Image (spheres, grey):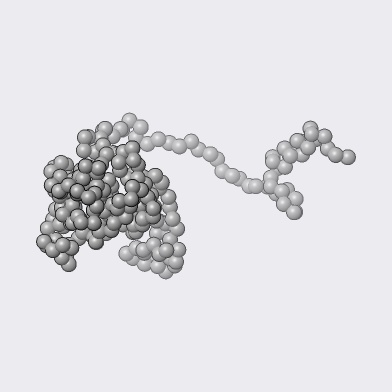
């Protein structure tokens, strides 16, 4: 005899209340723990609103750089752009480190007048890649502040020919990747088996590269012996 809907519902309720069913019958799921509501810390503290130089979502034209007539960054010296950008940022933030690390000017002083800045120049070789989808390439570079921390910087050309910074990110650059209109920054975390991946995409409304996704990626190939060592282990892919 087929069970009535009321009887079938009663059987289903019994299974749900009793535990999980398998080929050996019903089993107790065990103690699933107690759910706790999150506790808000320092509820009475609030950060000050951002100042004019801290407003997110705005492109910053680099002063002192000639306009690019053909809107092509291939003929622009990346080191000159970084120098001018750092100089303007230091003047704007008064050396507080809000817009640029205070060590940046001293680090740039290691660069010579050579096109590539010489062997001791901490500015990385520029990479050109179209991140905005308009068919024109953006300039991607980084200023290494020490053996670990760097400032990633991305520049584009505005319609009027001015060079503008569309992304500035101070981070431990475990890796930087570009694909189509995406730029991903890989950074180590406190857990050596994971790396944080920040994905930036072009936002035509703000004219900047905005964070679109933040994820954790596993670091394969790290053994227990390597984790027990000192100095940290790079995330191998």
Q: Residue 122: name its quadrant.
A: bottom left
Q: Residue 193: name its quadrant.
A: bottom left
Residue closer to the observer: 159 or 149: 159
Visible residue check, residue 163:
yes
Visible residue check, residue 224:
no
Q: Residue 62: name its quadrant.
A: top left
* Residue 214, horizontal then vertical, whole percent: 40, 48
Q: Residue at x 69, y 41 (%)?
A: 16
Quick one: quadrant of the N terminus? top right
Q: Residue at x 13, y 47 (%)?
A: 64
Q: Residue at x 16, y 62 (%)?
A: 115
Q: How many marks?
A: 0
Residue closer to the observer: 13 or 65: 65
* Residue 63, horizontal then vertical, whole percent: 15, 45
* Residue 67, horizontal then vertical, whole percent: 17, 47
Residue closer to the observer: 205 or 38: 205
């Amino acid at each position: 005899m087929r069970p009535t809907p009321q009887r079938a519902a009663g059987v289903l309720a019994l299974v749900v209340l009793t535990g999980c069913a398998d080929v050996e019958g019903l089993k107790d799921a065990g103690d699933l723990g107690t759910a706790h509501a999150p506790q808000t810390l320092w509820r009475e503290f609030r950060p000050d609103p951002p100042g004019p130089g801290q407003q997110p979502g705005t492109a910053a034209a680099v002063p002192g750089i000639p306009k690019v007539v053909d809107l092509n960054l291939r003929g622009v010296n990346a080191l000159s752009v970084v120098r001018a950008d750092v100089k303007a940022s230091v003047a704007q933030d008064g050396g507080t480190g809000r817009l640029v690390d205070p060590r940046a000017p001293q680090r740039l002083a290691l660069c010579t007048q050579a096109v590539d800045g010489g062997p001791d120049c901490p500015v990385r070789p520029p990479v050109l890649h179209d991140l905005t989808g308009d068919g024109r390439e953006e300039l991607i570079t980084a200023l290494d502040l020490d053996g670990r921390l760097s400032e990633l910087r991305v520049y584009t050309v505005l319609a009027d020919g001015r060079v503008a910074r569309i992304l500035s990110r101070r981070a431990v650059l475990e890796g930087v990747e570009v694909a189509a209109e995406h730029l991903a920054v890989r950074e180590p975390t406190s857990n050596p088996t994971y790396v944080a991946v920040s994905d930036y995409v072009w936002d035509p409304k703000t004219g900047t590269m905005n964070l679109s996704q933040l994820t954790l990626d596993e670091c394969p190939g790290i053994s227990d012996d390597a984790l027990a060592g000192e100095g940290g282990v790079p995330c191998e892919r």
